[in-house]
Image: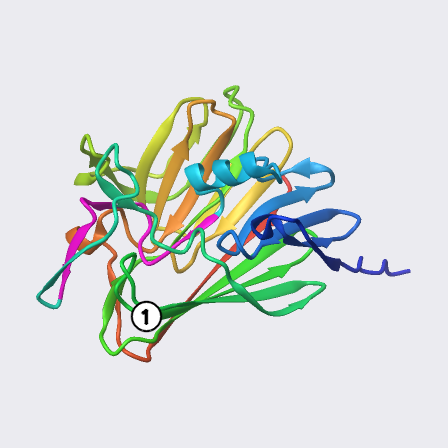
Amino acid sequence: MVAQKQIMTHQFVSNPDPRLSYYRFESPKTTFSIFPNLGASLLDWTYHGVPILAPFPITEAGIEQYQNDYQSSILFPFPNRLENGQFSHEGKNFELPINEPILNNAIHGCVSNCSFSVIEVNSHSIQLNYMHEPNQSFPFGFSLEVSYQFSEESVSIQFKIINLDKKSFPFGLGWHPYFRIEGDGKDTIHFTSDKTYAMNKHMIPTNSQMVANESMVLNNELDTPYRLTHPDIILNTKDYHLKLETKEFDYLQLYIPKNRKSIAIEPMTCISNSFNNGIGKKHLEPTASFTSNLTLRVINQN
C-alpha cells in the first residue's frame, strides 16, 4: 500500500505589533514561518521537532535581534558592505546612509525592514512583493518579488527583481540565514571554492587568495568571503544535515558570531563592496528583470 503524502496547512498568526505577525506553514513533520513585515524573512524552520534555523523570539527583543543580526534577511540591492556608503554609476556619484557606523559602511541593502505585500498564499507556498520608490536608501525604483515553496523536507526560494526606473542601476543579491549549530567542534561545512578574499580593518575585501575545496570544522569565529565553483553546500550538525543549492549565486560569505551557536551561510551574487570593486556586480536596464533561486533541503548523512 502506498503511503499518502502528508498535507501541509497554513495559517496567519496575528500580533499587536504587525512586524511580528506571520504566516505559519506546517505538517506533522515540519513548520516554517514567514514574516511579511520583517522583510519577508523566513525566521523559523523546525523539522521533526529539531530547530534548523537559529531561534527567533517573537518579542520586541526578537525584532532587535533581527535588526542587529539581519537574521534571514534578503540582502538587496547589495549584500554585505559598501565602503563609506559611496559608489559611482554612469558617471554620477551616489552616497547611501551609513548603517554600520563603527566601520563607516552601508551594509546589506535597504529591504530587510520593509513590509512586503502578500500576493498569493496557499498551504505550500507564499508569494510576496515590495515596491521601492527612489529614495535616500537607494535612488532607483524597483520591484522585488520573493516566492517560497515548501515541502516537508525543503524550502525553495525564488527572487525576481524588476527595474521600475528610467535608468539602469547596479545591484547584487544575497540572503542571510543563520543555522543552529552546537559550536563544540563537531559541526562541519563542505563546499567547493577556488578563491577567498583578504579583508581590511573595515571588513572590505582587498586582494584575493587561491584556495582548494573547502571542508571545515565550525568551532571558531569566522567572517570570510569565498568564490564558489560548485553550487552545493553541505552543513552537518549533530541534529540535522542540510544541503543548500545555490546555482545562481557565485559567492559565499560565512559568518560565525562570538557565541558560536549559529552560522550565517550567505549565498551572494557578488562580494562585499561590489559596486566599487566590480566583483560580481550586475546591472539591470529599465523594465528588465532578473530571477534567481535557492533551495534548502534536509538530507540523510552520507
Magenta stretch: includes residue 75: yes
Per the rendered image, the range of residues in magenta is 73-89
Q: Quadrant of residue 301?
A: top right
Q: Residue at x 67, y 42 (%)?
A: 46
Report x, y in % for residue 148. 57, 61
Viewer-side residue, 26 vs 1? 26
Q: Residue at x 29, y 75 (%)?
A: 165
Report x, y in % for residue 205. 20, 40
Q: Quadrant of residue 197?
A: top left
Q: Residue at x 29, y 39 (%)?
A: 100
Q: Residue at x 35, y 68 (%)?
A: 133
Viewer-side residue, 190 vs 74? 74
Magenta stretch: includes residue 37: no
Would residue 180 be seen by someone viewing this image from the given angle? yes
List the single residue furthest toward the right.
1
Viewer-side residue, 209 vs 269? 269
User: Is 132 on the left or on the right of 128, as rendered?
Assistant: left
User: Is 280 on the left or on the right of 113, as rendered?
Assistant: left
Report x, y in % for residue 94. 16, 58
List the single residue furthest toward the top.
184
Q: Amino acid at mark 1?
A: Gly
